[in-house]
Image (cartoon, helix red, strand yellow):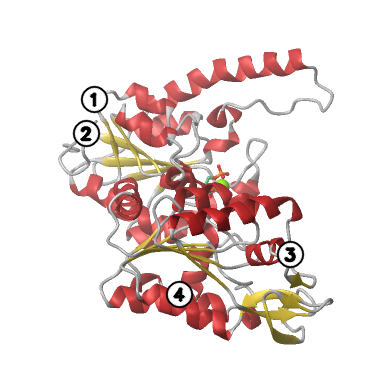
Amino acid sequence: MQSIDTYDFSGKRAIIRVDFNVPLDADFRVTDDTRIRAAIPTIKKVLAGGGSVILMSHLGRPKKNNDEKFSLRHIIPAVEARLGQQIDFADDCMGAQAAEKSAALKPGQVLLLENLRFYAEEEGKPRGLADDATDEQKAEAKKAVKASQKEFVKKLASYADCYINDAFGTAHRAHASTALIADYFPADKMFGYVMEGELKAIDKVMESPERPLVAIIGGSKVSSKIVIIEKLMERVDTLIIGGGMTYTFMAAQGGKIGDSICEPDQFDVALSILAKAKEKGIKMVFAQDALCGKEFSNDTPTQVCPSDAIPDGWEGMDVGPKAMEAFRAAILESKTILWNGPVGVFEMPTFEKGSRAVAQAIVDATAQGAYSLIGGGDSVACINKFGMADRVSYVSTGGGALLEYMEGIPLPGVNAIQK
Ligand code: 3PG
Ligand code: MG
């Protein structure tokens, strides 16, 4: 494994797997360029070292080739704006153009390849199987795509002299461009700065946090956060639970939650989390009160209720003022802070106040010297919406990858470089 800091890029073509899976609006304009901005230092490092760059990424989950909706062509202006120079584009990552253009790259030049997932070989999963395909047909199709995947990887690798994986957001996928390609560059593979930064930030929180360590876990479902909550309970001093999950915990303890979101099949899980917290001496902070709405809309009538005494016909959509105060106090007394998941329906201005209060408390704690890591798609969108991203210690570009890494699951994209 090489280091991007010491590798000699002069005269070399570096193929960089970036995660440019960014949100686009109806006119195909990039609405959040966090992931593009994050990749710029790596690209610039190669160019400054006298190398050229081939960028490869997926965008969305296309199911067929050349689906215009998922073309990476749409993001060219956003990349050029952040990079400060023009880039070239190859409209098929397997086409003659891709090979010719990468061979002709001169030091300082950048080429972007079209969406890797236009090919089933990127993920290595068969496509277009009939709904009633037999197990035999499925196995056959899988074998075929695994075979053609070898050619796909080989071709991508042939474009370059060295390989950089900087796609932290996709590091939990064992795909052609994130894992398999590394084998072609045994002595010329390395992490980019996004990867390095992400791994360092997570290790700082999970392995050697300055205490107290608080985690704020939001989101609507206990079921999707249970593994990370259990993992965090081995480490945190304080656990703040926010978002729709709150009502499952309240209902599990016999509370009245009106029409709030609830997973009755998770009651046992919720109760065992509470018991474990007690046993381990972890301070659990729940929202005592909730801002409730009559309907799931921004303009609905609202009232503040205790989170365990919500009348029928009302649902909790944000935390209330008492909760905001309690969350703030717990955050301000911590030295390391992890935030994953908004604590209310922050997309609606009426119900964004709780998440805004959490973000503000994290910003204030950071200003006092705490280390803060924000991760997971929604909380990142949230901190960006509030314009506070530059006042926390680290904003992760990973969603699923971040959670899996924190859960202790080995990431194929990381292992492929390290092995
Ligand atoms: C993401 O945004 O989650 C990553 O880019 C990975 O995409 P995927 O979940 O479609 O594999
Ligand atoms: Mg994902």
Distance Cα–Cα, label 2 vs label 4: 37 Å
Q: Residue furthest front?
A: 279
- Dot 4 falls on a residue whose secondary structure is helix
Q: Which residue appears at 64% of the width and 41% of the height?
A: 62
Choose between 198 and 231: the one closer to the eye: 231
Q: Nearer the viewer, mark 2 or mark 3?
A: 3
- Label drawn at residue 187: 1
Label 3–label 4 contact, CB within 8 A: no
Q: Amino acid at mark 3?
A: Ile
> In the rendered structure, which disc, 2 or 3, sits on the residue that comes first in sequence?
2
- Is 353 rendered above or below residue 81? below
Q: Decide: marks 2, 1 in contact (CB < 8 A)?
A: yes
Say which residue label 3 marks.
261
Decide which of 36, 367 is in the foreground and name it: 367
Q: Which mark is residue 359?
A: 4
Q: Residue at x 77, y 87 (%)?
A: 301
Residue shown at the point (74%, 50%) measured from the top left: 265
Q: Secondary structure at mark 1?
A: loop
Kind of residue sitting beneath label 2: Gln
